[in-house]
Image (spheres, helix red, strand yellow):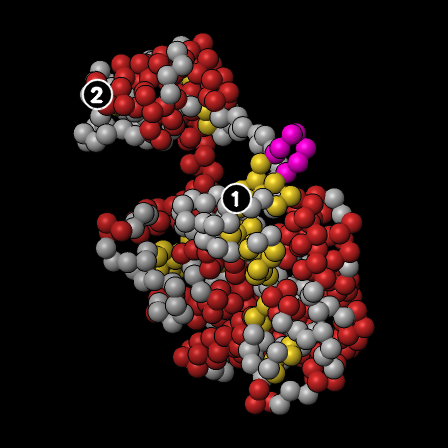
Amino acid sequence: MTNNCFIYCRKSTDRGDKQEQSLETQERICLEISQKYNLNVVDSYFEAKSAKNAGNRPKFDDMISRIQKGEASIIVTWGIDRLARNLTEAGLLQSLYEKQLLLKIYTHFDVYQSDRDFMGIGHEFVDASNFSRKLKNQVKDGIVTRLNRGEIPGSVKLGYYTVDKKLKPDPERAPFVKLAFEMYSQGYSLRDITQKLYELGFRSKKGYKIYMSSIDEMLKRIDYTGTFQYTNQLYKGNYEPLISMELFDKVQKLIVKNNIPKSKKHYFLYRGFIKCGDCGCMHTASLKKGKYIYYYCTNSKRICKQHQKYIEEQEMHDLYSNKLAELPIDVDVINEAYDFYAKNYLEKYKDMENQKNLILKQLGNIETRIKRLVDLYIDGNIQQEVYSQKYKDLLLEKETLNSTLNKLNTEKPETTLELVKNFKEYCCSLQNMYSQGNNEVKEEILNSVCWNFSIVDGEIASIQYKKPFDMIAKLPKNADFSQWWTVPESNRRSLQCECSALPTELTAPDPLGSTLYRKRRVLSINYIVCPNRVRVS
């Protein structure tokens, strides 16, 4: 008969104190479901076994065997997660439906009877998302009910304590909370308030000192007015307020006013970049006559012989521009290297596309093998142990191929090459941009190219470049391009290039990387044209 069914009840452990729904409760609900839909119960199964791994439940296997024999075509269970939590048995149930041996699954929450229902049932078996979703909605509904009753969520706030599950003002600490708000409204600082309350005996429930950060957080809480906020919405509390809304608003205005950051009076381009080559202290700057900016050593160690020597900002522009001009950036060499890089990049991209197509073909073959394996098991042509092991092996192989596929880059090569080209042009025009640009352009180049530099006797004594410009600085200006690609295999070395300080619009992922060779002081020009973090082995 098409209305014959099996009832299946399961709990994950035989310990009753660790199971939310007992077998007895599940049986009662399943019987109610069978009566509601006029189902004929052929047999009932009760099992205290985990469904995490396949082949662990003999009663479940017996029920599946009887379904294959046609004794029943319907399963009634408390929740879909009671049937399976692994892909092997989930696939088995789905195959039974495709063979029309299993027509429906009734649960306390849903009825699975169509192709659409069974299409996504595998995911529900694995993570029991249906139950979690319903439980979340139940919890959410309960929270809304408590909010409307004026019950404030979360832990008990400082200044209150609970009596019969209701908030009451704490007679020991509530007066201190009021005093903190009043003192801040009168202009006292947080430090003064914290110290004063401590001297008066303000302590936590465990007797610890309440620090300034806690006082600051307390002053920002609207809860003490008898109104509380939850998910950007205000609710009227059912507890006694400690302060008035007028006092709270006054305190909030003062907090905003006191926290407004003070703007810098002067802008000094090179401050933070210049070190003294004599004592190692940083240079600072000052404005003279309202228009002249001078840099000089802070002499914080009190041992410097250079701190009386001032450098005007225009001199600093010239010094740094001259240093950029010393970088061995040969336009012809860079263009030739870029062409070489682009050619190799496109070839490797084509190889990667071929690899992706091969993996997709292998994944299709695995799907076909899984379907055949399940058919063999349903028809009784393969043992349970062999089926489970083969199914796991195929899933592992599928997961490995998908992982490899995800690691392959899917970005079009034209996009990456365009960004590489932009960086190449950035390097070629670096010195010119710095010389002719305004302070905003100069600051961007400083942040992109340089960590810091030291000054001795009004000259740049040393300079520390950021990657990859530190590599560029070591390149000889008269390097022969042909030498850059003839480095012996024994001299190749793994290098890593970080360009995180470059302007973000000039950086992008490089899926294939670049070959970086070093022989003496000759480096591959890929260090110049590579726009991102490059790792080579």
Does residue 487 appear left or right of residue 112 in this picture? right
Q: Nearer the viewer, mark 2 or mark 1?
A: 1
Neighbourhood count class around disc 2 (C-alpha, 10 Å): few under 14, some 14–19, many 20 upward: few
Total labels: the figure holds: 2
Q: Name which residue lies at 47% across and 17% down.
A: 254
Residue pointed to by mark 2: 199
Q: Secondary structure at mark 2?
A: helix
Q: Nearer the viewer, residue 339 or 403?
A: 339
Which residue type carries mark 2?
Glu
Residue pointed to by mark 1: 308
Q: Is residue 292 magenta?
A: yes
Image x and y of residue 360, in percent: 66, 74
Name above or below for residue 95 compared with residue 450.
below
Q: Nearer the viewer, residue 391 or 289?
A: 289
Q: Is residue 395 magenta?
A: no
* Magenta region: 287-293
Name above or below for residue 493 compared with residue 263.
below
Q: Secondary structure at mark 1?
A: loop
Image x and y of residue 161, in percent: 25, 23
Name above or below for residue 40 compared with residue 371.
above
